[in-house]
Image: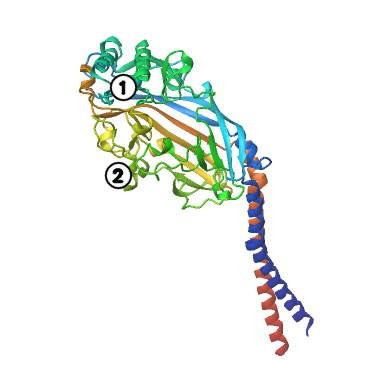
Amino acid sequence: MEKRTKISLCIAISGVVVLILGVILGWVVLPFVIKIMIDKEARLTNGTLIYDKWVDIPLPIHLHVYVWRVVNIDDYVGSNWTTKPILEEVGPYVYSEKRVKYEITPNVERDTVFFRQNITYTFVPELSIGPETDTVDVLNAPLLAVATILYTIPEKYLPLPHRSFMELLMGPLSGEKFIRKAVSVHDIVFGVRLNFIYDIILVLVELILGDYVTLPPELQNVGGRGWQFAPFVNKNGTNSDGLWEIYSGVRDNSMVNMIRTVNNNETIGNGKYWGTPECNKFRGGDGIFFPPYVEKTDRLAAYQHESEFRGISTYRFAATKDLFASPDEFPENECYCVTPREPLDPTCAPTGVVRLRSCKTGAPVVMSKPHFLDADESVINGVTGMKPEKEKHDTFLDIEPTLGVPLKGVRRIQVNVETQPFISMGEIFKTLPFSYIPFIWVGEGAELDDDLYNELKSMYLTPLKIANIGKWTAVGLGIAGTLGGAVALGYFTWWLKR
């Protein structure tokens, strides 16, 4: 055989071999090796890469707080509270968030880990618009919360003489108004000392109604020093959430960091908060990381689109309008329409808000997106000052899908107070409008800093990228060698026969 023909044949055969090896290595061996590497690390056991970061999260997390100031406070001086509130957003006031886990106990049989967690908030003045001692005129949320709880207690539990005495305390004797003036931002967030009248009322409630009424966590007698009210009362530097149990991912890493129980309960509020067992189930984890191999169809939230963070490809998930949609628009939310205690209006809340009465022991707490984003027009127009913008007020998460690591995200939520007339609670409460009034909104967000970005890139993403380039290079060389050798072989064979 002609020497050049032999060379061409060798090139073609070598090309085929390289192509086959490239396919085997790139689509069989390499994915298998990468999966072994990820599976080994994607578990909550001492010694894995994620374990230490899970115990003491190095990611800089910030809580951005915005308070709703009531502008037209003079309209609420008297006993007529029918005026529409004019509100102004004040913020951000930024707090760094430090989470440290302790009492970590693995349970091999259940493939889980038990732990407690302390969360500490530290004010960050350089990221805030002013000191946390700034004062704001805000809605008197504790007054409305306690009034609503008393208003809905049946007479058999709270006889008329007791009710009348408490209503007298809540009304003229308390000196309380629809607006609380000049409350510091710190107190609004972490606890404002309430009027001494609350000390009397709430102690009486506990003594007389202890078996029927459990006060919401926003109302606490902190350290026996008097009653306080705030969204984060007694939650700074404490373990306010109790004992958690999450899956460790040793046997099944598709469940790693997903919640199994909280305080040894497999359902929210012992399954009594929402209308069906399914809606009372715990779903998801704490958002710090997710199981590996994230798919666009996973129900972390609603998949939006492919995105990018500092050159790293990610999937973006976000909270859609369906999250707070009324059952008329989204029937799956029917279980969250829990009928309140009489004589409150039993109608389901409109789109954009969800009542938390069932898990706040009757308090008129309502959750929504900030500025009532995606809410019904009737909700937005119930107050003046709402300016909803998707980019500023929605929740989103950018996740690197192979590892399940969030690279950037923010969770935004607004706390509101629902008002409606209380016919039997004194003159001022009779004039309350049917409305949802914002009190505060927060954005809890984080993104990978330089140190974590470089670590993630050097240990996982760069090798993955090199491996991906390598397999396609091998395939390309294999195809080129095969085609080149085949063409040369064909040419020399033709030339010899000529």
Residue 281 visible, this orientation: yes
Q: Position of residue 114 (x, y in %)?
A: 57, 37
Foreground: 272 or 238?
272
Left/right of residue 214 with respect to residue 294 in the rendered view: left
Residue 362 vertical position relative to residue 254 in the rendered view, above or below: above
Foreground: 102 or 75?
102
> Could you tell me if the residues under marks 2 and 1 are in contact, i.e. CB atoms within 8 Å?
no
First in sequence: mark 2 or mark 1? 1
| Type of amino acid under label 1 | Leu
* Numbered label attached to residue 285: none
Residue 138 visible, this orientation: no
The C terminus - image quarter: bottom right
SS at circle 1: helix
Foreground: 187 or 239?
239
Q: Quadrant of residue 167?
A: top left
Q: Which residue is mark 2?
A: 327
| Type of amino acid under label 2 | Pro
- The residue at the point 64 percent across, 62 percent down is 28
Left/right of residue 210 with respect to residue 27 in the rendered view: left
Q: Position of residue 96 (x, y in %)?
A: 54, 27
**Alpha-carbon neighbours of circle 1 within 10 Å: few (<14), some, or many (≥20)?**
many
Q: Which residue is mark 1?
A: 144
Left/right of residue 410 with respect to residue 432 in the rendered view: right
Q: Quadrant of residue 380?
A: top left
SS at circle 2: loop
Residue 422 vertical position relative to residue 114 in the rendered view, above or below: above
- The residue at the point 27 percent across, 45 percent down is 328
